[in-house]
Image (tube, rainbow, N blue to C red):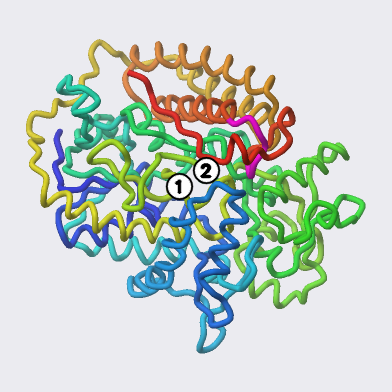
Amino acid sequence: MRIESDILVIGSGIAGLSFALQAANHGSVAIVTKRDISESATKYAQGGIATVFSDEDSFDAHVEDTLVAGAGICHEDVVRMVVEEGPQTIRNLIEWGVKFTTNGKDYDLTREGGHSARRILHAEDITGREIERALVEAVQQHPNIQVYEHHIAIDLITDAKIRRRTMKQNRCLGAYALDINGNRVRTFSSKVTLLASGGAGKVYLYTCNPDVASGDGVAMAYRAGATIANMEFMQFHPTTLFHPQAKSFLISEAVRGEGAILRRRDGTAFMPKYHKLKDLAPRDIVARAIDNEMKTSGDDCVYLDITHEPADFVRTRFPNIYQTCMEFGLDMTKEWLPVVPAAHYLCGGVAVNTNAETDLPGLYAIGEVACTGLHGANRLASNSLLEAAVYAGRAFKHATETIKALESDLRDIPEWDSGTATNSDEMVVVSQNWDEIRRFMSNYVGIVRTDKRLERAMHRIKLIQAEIDEYYWNFNITSDQVELRNIATVAEMIVTCAQMRKESRGLHYNIDYPERDDVNCKKDTFIKKQF
């Protein structure tokens, strides 16, 4: 079954939905999303969205904080562009119905690690849920937008694949997607395709990402021939609740922003010895500090203490976190919360320019799937939602102009051909490979790395990929197969980029190269599939 539209959007977080709302005024839009439309990483963002919204703050200060956190490889022109376009982008979200928390007549601005001023707009401690609510409601009311829930994109459709053209003549023409409930592959043809599919936290054993974050977009783009950048920089959120019944529940950095202290089991506050900002140090510093404390002490976790703040303030400022912790028998107003680092945000991704264009014509990428140059080697807290929203506006303007100038015949795109594939009765192969990848990525390619660990990880991923390829082509497509293939591809890219960077910088820390090398390594890491 063929579905044709002017624009295909893959993903339904803040990036995809805010782009779709603007683009739909200039053409037809199809949105493909793996689960319900509201299920995305955006929904789970607690802290907020950073922008200069106070007379006591400045663009220069926000730019400087971002550059410091990015450890020397942010693109300064991109940083300044995003920061300066931020306030208007926030106003657009407010016009779409997002209700940020106020303290009377003004918005209640908070502070998080790495920020020199209060510039985080939030909706209590469920900011992402509020943003997603407003955008979903607006999208569902727009007559030019059609949403296809429970559809997982399999591969991008390109000229090089279907018309045997050279890579120089290559262009993205849409995507094949599996209708999970209908158990059929649909052909989505489009003049412009936008990847807004989020991150890849599920490549690791412990992650605070939702289950949909399996790196689908970056894997598809790589297979289609787009350039990928900086995959070695996976941000680990320092404070994820450590509890046997909690499924990687994130304790927002805003808790530390309001005065929480990280402690060892014996009560020692350990962050002062790691950074001058103590508990408000950038996330890479805090995550490595916790990792080191756990390895040194042999403890399974460290503790986050905000019991010294008034109980009413804690309950009012963090109602969702407080209530969720209470459901696990933990009262954060009276006891320390056990926390561990978990894979949180992919700072690398599909390389794009300031209009969100990839180097594959017809393909754009925004949000966590993209590498814009904003985050560098480490993302500053709450810059991600800002980046997604700013780039959605820039991508929409450029993409709609592209559509007007484009003459593309989409009628001869072939339907998906499953060949001689049959149904599988060996799904244990998928679960075994999935589990093995996530475990060796956590053990060998986590917060702290070595050359030997990276070699071992690459050896294992090559063996597993051979098994996956054989399984993939012999059996009918399932969503589990698609995700397994993608996390294997993403794992290989992370290891490849980590092996290329012979230094320690930001989120990439290699014991064999413990120092930062600004002479040879102060640059992005690029990889591109060879055909």
Report the residue at 37% width, 20% height from top. Answer: 530
> Which of the two labelled residues, at mark 1 and mark 2, occupies the earlier sequence position?
2
**Which quadrant of the rendered structure holds the C terminus?**
top left
Instruction: Write the start and end of the magenta stretch as one range.
Output: 501-507
Report the residue at 60% width, 64% height from top. Answer: 320
Q: Is residue 505 magenta?
A: yes
Report the residue at 60% width, 42% height from top. Answer: 343
Picture disc at residue 346: 2
Q: Secondary structure at mark 2?
A: strand
Question: What kind of residue is marked 2?
Answer: Leu
As rendered, which of 69 and 491 lies closer to the eye? 69
Separation (CA) of disc 1 from disc 2: 6 Å
Q: Main secondary structure of the magenta part?
A: loop
Q: Say whether residue 500 is visible.
A: yes
Picture disc at residue 188: none
**Where is residue 396, by image quadrant?**
bottom left
The answer to whether the residue labelled 1 contacts the one labelled 2, judged by CB atoms less than 8 Å apart, is yes
Q: Position of residue 31 (x, y in %)?
A: 27, 48
Question: What kind of residue is marked 1?
Answer: Glu
Q: Is residue 369 magenta?
A: no
Q: Is residue 75 left or right of residue 438?
A: left
Query: Which residue is under mark 1?
Result: 368
**Where is residue 85, by image quadrant?**
bottom left
Q: Position of residue 419 (x, y in %)?
A: 23, 13
Q: Position of residue 218 (x, y in %)?
A: 41, 36
